Amino acid sequence: MHTFYRGQPEAVALPTRTEHVQAIVRLCRRARVPIVPRGSGTGLIGGAMAPRGGVMIGLNRMNAILAVDLPNRCATVQPGLINLWLTQAVAARGWFFAPDPSSQMVSSIGGNVSTNAGGPHCLKYGITTNHVLGLELVTGTGELVRLGGAAPDPPGYDLTGACVGAEGTFGLVTAVTVRLRHQPEAVKTALALFDSLDAAAEAVSAIIAAGIVPAALEMLDDVMIGAINAGIAPIYPAGARAVLLIELDGPRGEVEAQAGQAAELCRARGALEVRVARDEAERALLWKGRKEAAGAVGRLAPTYLLQDAVVPRTKLPAIMRELQAIAARHGVRIANVFHAGDGNLHPLILYDDRRPAELEAAKQANEALLAACIAMGGSVTGEHGVGLDKAKHLPLQYAEADLNFMARLRGVFDPDRLMNPDKVLPSHPACGEGFRPRRPVLPEGAWV
Amino acid sequence: VSAAVAARAVGPALGAIVGPERLDAGGEACQRAAVDDLVPRWVVRPATLDQIAATLALAQDAGLAVVPRGSGSAGALGAPPAAVDLVLDLTGLDRVLAWHPDDLTVTVEAGCRAGALGARLHARRQWLALDPPGAAQRTLGGIVATNASGPRRVRYGTARDLLLGVRFVQADGIVTWGGARVVKSVTGYDVPKLMVGALGTLGVLVELVFRLHPVPDAEASWLATFTHAEPAQAFVARLLDSTVEPNRVEWLSGPALAAAGLGHAALGVAVSVGTVSEAVREQGERLAGFARATGGPLTALSDDVWASLERAQEADVGTVLRLSTLPSQLAATAQEADRAVAAALPGARARLTGCAAVGSLALLLPALEPAAAAGVVEHLRAFVAGFGGHVVIERGPRALRAAVDPWGPVGPGPLALMRALKAEFDPKRLLNPGRFVGGL
C-alpha cells in the first residue's frame, strides 16, 4: 500500500436502488465517462481511487440485508452492508460470516467481494470467494445479470467465481448471496514466544505437518514486538523475537487435543513460553497485539509501504532471511506481521515521507522483496488485491499469454473498459486491443 | 480445399507433432473413441504440453473439432457434440509434478488419476478431497472439467474451492496459466474458476495445482433411518444448525439403501465425522440426540460403508440426473422425484443419493424410454425452478440428451455472457462444440 494515490472524480453518486446503478452505468457509457465503484474506502491498493476522474459510485446506501436463510446456510445482502453487521445479525442464532479482513468493522461486503478479501481466519475457512454463492451484477454494458445462487453447481461457466476479485472492472455488484457458517463449538487461542523467527517458522511447519489446520496462525517479528511493547502496552517479555499466535476452533474434543499438541510442538522447537487463553478476556488480550500491530508502527515511522506477497509456507524462514538482507541493502527498517499459516506476508517498510530519499529506498526494497517472493514460487498479493498499486507487478507472475487472457476476459464483461480503469491489469502490450500472443511453432513440414 | 485433401494433409502433420505411435487415424481406436456415435478421424495421445499446444494450433488452422478426453467416464454428459474430428486423449500426461506436503499443495498433470494420486498422498496422511463416484479411475482433469463432486463436499467444498492454479491450452494453441501455486493468492482474475465445470470448452486443461487437506486422525459413520422424508429433512436441519462438523451427510432413499445392502428402511441419512477420536465419540452422541428427536434410529456403520455405497452407485450404468436443490427442500424434492419416477414407471421409487447438506442429489433412473426419462427431467425442472434449483443429466443415452436439453435453462443474462466468453476464446467453436450449456 502506498498512501500517496490521488485522483478525484468529477461526480459522486450514492444510489439507493439497483435501477439507479444501472441507469448511471448506461449514462456514463454513452458519455464514455469512467466509473469507479467504492464501498467503505478501506482498501489498501488504491482500488477505489479515480485516477482518470469520472463518476464515483458509492454503494454505501445500498446496505440492507435482503434475506437471511439459515436452513440453507446463506444470506443475500446489498454490497454496502458492513461485513461485521452480517455476523452481528446472525450471531444470536449461532451463525457467522467467515471472511474477516482486519477492516471488518468498517469494510463493506461489496468491497470484500471485489477484492476477494481474506483475513486471519481464511487459513481454515478460505477467502471471500469460497463463501460467495451468487451475485447480482450490473456489467460494463449496463446489463443486470443474476449469477449463481443458493442452489449448488449452477450449470454453465462459473461467472460468479470469475467476478469475485475482479475489483469492479467487470461491473458493479448490487447484491451478494453468501454462505453462512455455524459457530464452532469451541475456540482456543494460544500464544507462543520464540527467541528467533526461524524457530517460530519451524513450529508453524511442525503444526501443519501434524495434520492440524488452525483457524488462524499469525506471526509478529521483533521489530513489531518492539513497536507494540512501546506503543500499546508491554505485552511481550524482553527476549521474545518472534510471536506466534495460534487459534484453533471446532469440536471441543478436537480443539482441546490439538491445542495441547500445538503447544507441545512449540515447546519442542524451543518456545520460551506458551500462553493459553482460559477465557474470552484472555483471548482478546492475546489478540490485542496482533490487531493493533499496524497502528503501533506509527511509533517507529510516520509512514510505511504495506506489502501483501505470499510465499509457500515452507519458504518462510528463507524469505525472512532474504527480507533482512534486502532491508540492510536498502537501508530501511521493515516490521513484520503476517499470516504464517498460509505464507501471506505483510511487511511494513518504514519511511519518512518528508524525506524523498527514504521513500525511494522503501520503494526499491519493496520491488526487491516482491521479486524474491515470486522467485520462491509465491504470489504478488494474497488478500489485499491488485488495484492501482500492484497492476504493474502482474507481469512478474504472469506471462504475456496469461495477461492477454485476463484482458480479454475483462473485455467480455466491460467491452468499453470504462469500469474502474487502470485497476488490476497493467498497461502492458499484452493487455492491449488486438494483441495476440505467439502461437506454437509447428514442426517442419507439419502443415502446408 | 476439399475435406479429403485436408484429411490427407492433417494425418502426416499430426504424425509429425506426436509421432506415429501416438496417433490413430481411423480403425478400431477411432471407433472406440466415438462420442455419441460420432467417430473421430484421429485419436491423438500427446505426451507433452508442447504436443498438445501444437495439436490444437493445427486443429485450429484446419478447422477440426476437438474433444479432450480423460478416462472417458463423462462421455455421456452434455448435449451430443456438433462435430468430432479429433479426440485428444490426455491419459498419457499422468505425472505428479510436484507435491509439497508441508505446504499442503500438489501439482499434477491433467491425465493423472485421482486413485493414483490418492495412493501417494496417503503416505503422509493427506488427501485431495474430491470424491465423486468412481473417482479412483477418473482423471483429475476430467473431474475438474466436469465439476464432479462427492459426499465430502460438505466439508471440503468442490473443485472450485480446491483448484489453486491451472495451465491450459487455448483453442488456438496458446499455452496459458491462471491462478497461483500457493494456497492464497488474489493476483489478477480468478481464471481457475472459469475452467471448473467448463467441459474444456474454453481451453484444454493440462496442469492443475490443488490444495490438500490432512486426513483426520479418526473417522466414524452412522446411519439414521426414517419412515418419511420430512423427519429425515428435520434431522439434516438439526445437524446443520449445530456445532457438529460432519465430513459427509448423504441422503439415501429406500432403493439406494437397498442397493448398498443397508437394509430396507424407507429413507436414510448417512453421516460421517472425522476428527480426533475423542471428538468423534462426542459428535456421535450429538447425532444420536438429533436422531432421537426426529424419530430416526441411529446405527453405527463400518468404515467401508462409503466404498460399498460408491460401488452400488457405480454398478448402475443407467441414467443419472443431478438435482441441485436446497436443504430446506430435501423432503419435497424426494417426494417429487418419487412422483416423477412413478409416473414414468408405475410402482417405481426414486433411487436418490447425494449431499443433503448442500442439496446436491443424484437420481439414478430405472431403464426408461427416452420420452419417459425426458418427462422425469421436465417434471423435476418445473419443480426446482420455484427455488432456483437445477436438473442436469449427468449421464444418459444420446437419445435422451437429444430429446431434452441436458443442462436445462440458463438465464438470458448469464447465457449472453457465456456466449460472449466462448466467442472470445474459441471463436471457431472447435473445443467440444455443441456439448455445453446453450449449445456452446
Image (cartoon, coloured by chain):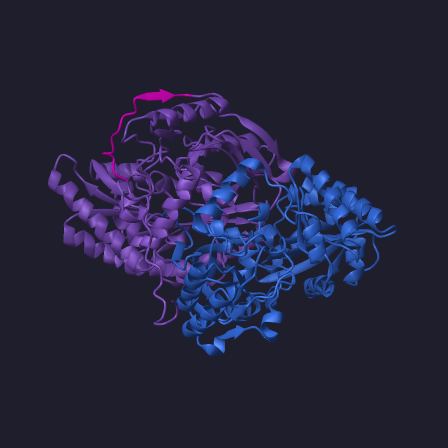
Magenta stretch: residue A46 in it?
no
Residue A278 in view of the camera: no
- What hue represents chain A? purple
Q: Is residue B100 above or below residue A218?
A: below
Q: Could you say where residue A430 lies in the image, as x and y percent from the top left?
A: 30, 49
Residue at position x 80%, y 47% in the image: B338
Q: Could you say where residue A311 lies in the image, as x and y percent from the top left?
A: 34, 56
- Give the main secondary structure, helix, strand or loop, of the magenta stretch: loop
Q: Could you say where residue A66 lies in the image, as x and y percent from the top left?
A: 56, 27
| Front residue (pair A245, A411) | A411
Q: Could you say where residue A197 lies in the image, as x and y percent from the top left?
A: 30, 56
Residue A37 in which image quadrant: top left
In-image side of B47 versus B223 (left or right) = left
Q: How many marks?
A: 0
| Front residue (pair B4, B159) | B4
Residue occupying the far front of the picture: B2
Residue occupying the far right of the picture: B347
Chain (blue): B
Residue at position x 18%, y 48% in the image: A364
Residue at position x 53%, y 52% in the image: B198
Magenta stretch? A1-14
| Front residue (pair B99, A136) | A136
In-image side of B31 versus A351 (left or right) = right
Residue at position x 30%, y 22% in the image: A10
